[in-house]
Image: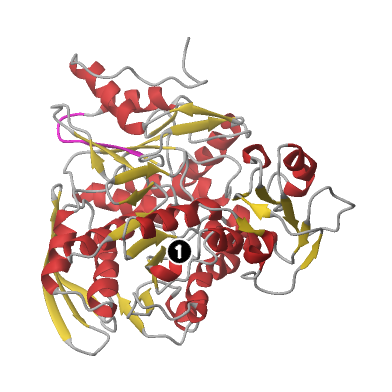
Amino acid sequence: MPDKTLSELIQGLPGDVSISGLDVAISGVVLDSRKVQAGSLFVACPGETADGHRYIQDAIQRGAAAVVGVERVGELSVPYVRVKDSCQALAYLAAAYYGFPARQLMVIGVTGTDGKTTTANLIYQILQAAGLRAGMISTVNAVIGDQELDTGFHVTTPDSPDVQRYLSQMVQAGLTHVVLEATSHGLAQQRVAACDFDLGVVTNITHEHLDYHGSYQAYRAAKGLLFTSLASTPDKAISHSRGAVLNRDDSSFDYLYEMTSLPRISYGFDARANVRPEQILFDSSGLRFTALGRDQDDREFSLQISANLVGDYNVSNCLAAIAATRGLMRLEDAAVQAGISHLPGVAGRMERIDLGQDFTAIVDFAHTPNALRRTLQAARRLTHGKVIAVFGSAGLRDRQKRRMMAETSAELADYTILTAEDPRSESLEVILAEMVAGVLARGGLEANTFWRIPDRGEAIRFAVQMAQKGDLVIACGKGHEQSMCFGAIEYAWDDRTAMRAALAELLGAAGPPMPRLPTSAA
């Protein structure tokens, strides 16, 4: 991108700003002082673990041409722009640097606790099937034309400079539509500010991230920011559809309905939903159902849907995608049907691992109480044998869900194996003990109906060796993720690789070695 002046960038900032120093040329907008290069604009944001204001001098020494922050600072050798919210300013400055790319795209935002990535992928596939030049930014990757870019180790919305850079690349590639997955952290921390959303889609809002948000109400309010932002989106030549897609079955429906006055369309099993399912059939190969609904113009439609998604809870994800694309965007029936059927599945979401064993092995991302419940209910319907669940609960995250998830597994699985899942700087022993309390409260018997095995590789190996013909082993919580955090270090880890390694050992077949973690035996 060509350099822009500081004064050009700050023209797009909301609210009052004060600037000290002379105007300078800016070669990029940076959040991390370690990434500063000559000419960068460094934005100091207060963070959960570190305050960017502490690194202002480091950024200047690395070549920052100017600094933005919220605090009063002494004399600096470069211009300083003081704002009320530097995280919001970061997003708008990055958007200004890239020429506000979201204003040249139709932007579809997808939020919720569970099912965001699957729903985003379904919408993306439908847009593609409709012949639209679409991109996608999810917590898994960014898809820009033929490029597929990794967006990080763990699932959250990328930082705002990255989001704006991806949007700019999409505009340069000639794309017209983008599906953007918006997490609660991404919304609360303004990472998706200046994204000018046209459509907002919610999957559900259940118990999660209360460690960060403090309460369910605050968590719900963060999700609601997507819908309140719709009113401030400027008119676009590319977009002719605006509105909200809401889950009629979810407790968030009434709250979110009041968050916008734009057109709203609902989906769900509730008879009052605008888009609802009938004649649902599912097995280990996928789903089939009829979607009945009314679009934004109150015209009825009926679609025969076939999806390669395992688990009947994916009916809701399909309905959300249908409500957005057929209900609000009024895309053709054939495009909606083709897009859903073309999605082969989503990495790490009810993904089957088959090396020829006589039982079913699945890796899934379920890491919340609601997701685990739905996943185990689906697993129960996929087998007449035993359900063996392997999962943990992350450190430095919502502690309440540890017991809740353990209780859920004690109720729905035949055997529960508790193990590591990103303990970070917390004691893994303490995390497991809190989970054990949940299983015991539901009548579990250690070494009989449940086990605690700290090493995740050993836990998956144990589950596979326990399985009998016709059983189902499911490893939950990591899904597609490529690392696990112990202390401050990310260790290479993939549940799918671990499952293949365990199955290969069991069968005496060729397969990958079991990944190693700090908990692995020497």
Q: Position of residue 93 (x, y in %)?
A: 61, 61
Residue extent of the magenta highlight: 468-475
Residue at numbered disc 1: 101
Above or below, 271 relative to 103? below
Q: Amino acid at mark 1?
A: Pro
Q: Residue furthest bottom?
A: 298
Q: Position of residue 118 (x, y in %)?
A: 31, 55
Task: From the viewer's side, name the closer residue of 336 and 479.
Answer: 336
Q: Position of residue 455 (x, y in %)?
A: 46, 24
Residue 299 seen by the camera:
yes
Residue sitting at x 64%, y 40%? 37
Task: Tell me how many marks there are.
Answer: 1
Q: Secondary structure at mark 1?
A: helix
Please give left or right for residue 435 compared with residue 65 in the image: left
Q: Position of residue 521 (x, y in %)?
A: 47, 13
Please give left or right for residue 380 compared with residue 111 in the image: left
Residue 157 seen by the camera:
no
Above or below, 261 relative to 139? below
Q: Is residue 427 magenta?
A: no
Please give left or right for residue 204 compared with residue 487 in the image: left
Residue sitting at x 40%, y 74%? 198
